[in-house]
Image (cartoon, helix red, strand yellow):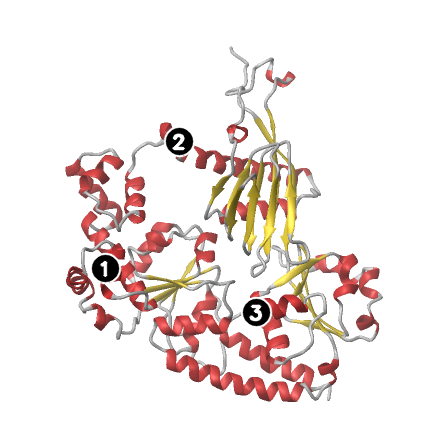
Amino acid sequence: MNSEWINSHYPIYSAANIQSLYTTTNMPMHKINEPSPVLIGVARGKGILRMDDHAHELTEGNVVLLPPHRHAALIANAQHPLHAYRFAIHTIEQTGSLLAGAMIQKSELNAYSSIKLIPNQSSIVAQMEELYIHRSTASEMRHVQNQIIVHQIILQLLQQHNEHDPTGDQPSMERSITYLESHYTDKISREHLAEIAGVSHSHYSILFKKMTGFSPNEYLSRLRIHRAMELLISGSGTLREIALEVGYKDEFYLSRRFKQHAGTSPSGYNQRTSHRIAVLLPPYASHLLTLGVEPTVIIAESNEYVNATDLAPPQSITFMNTSSTIEQIDATLLENGIELIIAAKQHLDMYGLNLAHLRAIAPVIEIPWMDLGWKEHLRLIAKAVHRSELAEQWLAAFEQEEQAARSLVQQSAAADEIITILVSKPEGLYVYGARNAGYVLYQSLGLHSPERIRPEIDKLGDQFHSIPIELSDLAEYAGDRILVIVYPDANGSSSHSDALFNSIHWRTLPAVLRENIHLLDLDEWIPYNPISIRLQLQRAAALFGSDQ
């Protein structure tokens, strides 16, 4: 019996180290030079990765593989502070006693001589975050879990490598559909799609309809018409420009195909309100409810939604968990006759949903999440559902409430104090900026933020979410009054915050000694949408106005 290890000539992988990197105006650059391949995963923000004479723009969800022994620099974007994870991958490629003298092949990851940029890999970034959180293993079981995650990351990188390797480019129906979704503006023949799928021309249409519910021509038409709808909603270009952009020869042909599909002309569509809307994650559902529009389908982590006294409770919303399969999501959206999908690309990437694929079901309006504040979110969503006038009325009423609350709070002791929003999460401490609870405090009420973050708030406004700090840095950010929000861990425990409250750094703060501390409820102060912001304004006015 042969006792050799199966495929023992391949390399052994392990994690050399993992770090959490933040690039801000205070720390504008991180230099990288490792003897092993380095994986950079962008968790939030934007930046530039420079190696040799080449610069690569990075955005949220990007993953970059750097070759070993190469100098590179991660550089901040002044408008969008970047948070990334840096993961050095150790490979064993020599013989070992365990392998009985077998020669191990060179790692494919070590074979790269240039940067490999892989977009839309939020799942890998999430795995890197988990590795960082559990980098100090407390048990052998956690150590094994970390090893599994490391190999899951390696597997995905190797799959990416093989997908772009011509020798691994095996034909399939899925690949042909993906090709159609990515090249729908081109002239595409059924014969070409069948060739990609590796099936006969006559059999291709049968298999395609079995998988999608549509013929190839119907699917192509839906992709083009739905993209035209997206452009009409956003007001991007003339009808002729839209026709050419989506793959039609002129505006007349577009209008004919548009009416066949939608039952109305492009001009008529622009006057029509979509009544059956799907949203990804509750924040945008709350924007719709603010506008008096009840979403038909919400794809979210739970079926919770915001209740407010001035809104009628939702009557008939279909909730889908983000863990649902693509096939389940497709079927639910089609069964509910969805006419419009509203989502942020960040959230689509996070849950492995492809915008180009969803477009075959309904037009997709992409509303950037971190790049915009809640008022801009509301205005863009209102434009998409023809409720812009109602949105402006709501915002005008809110601004009156802001002015009244500011007048009240500016007469209180808090008006002359520095207010710090300190958030304790299982992975660390954060000082919040002008988003979430910070919007109401620093924007609506005009209260003073810590001096260390004031330049970022002045420059970025409510795009400045938060900054991580160490316990030893607490005194530099702590103001006259501290608002504390604690995030529980995955098991619902907040015991991790004991490290903060029992530390000498916390107990010696002037605000703590004066008992000028407020513990805030996470669910009341963190949600970021019009309804929640309005409620936070009322709570803040009550909290600070009582000090008069």
Which of marks 1 and 2 precedes in the sequence? 2
Where in the figure is residue 126, as x and y percent of width and height? Answer: 55, 49
Residue picked out by circle 3: 462
The amino acid pointed to by label 2 is: Asp
Residue 396, given in percent of the width and then of the height, sits at 48, 85
Question: Which amino acid type corresponds to the residue marked 1 in the rendered image?
Answer: Ala
Relative height, residue 434 to residue 184 (above, below): below
Instruction: Give the distance between the C-alpha atoms of the residues marked 3 and 1, in whole angstroms.
Output: 37 Å
Q: CA distance from mark 2 to mark 3?
A: 43 Å
Write down the residue under mark 2: 165
Q: Is residue 166 above or below residue 189?
A: above
Q: Regarding mark 3 in the picture, which secondary structure is present there?
A: helix
Q: Residue at x 69, y 40 (%)?
A: 139
Q: Nearer the viewer, residue 278 or 171?
A: 171
Q: Of the residues tagged 2 and 1, which is closer to the observer?
A: 1
Q: Residues within 10 Å of mark 3 (few under 14, many from 20)?
A: many
Q: Are marks 2 and 3 in contact (CB under 8 Å)?
A: no
- Residue displayed at 55% across by 35% down: 151
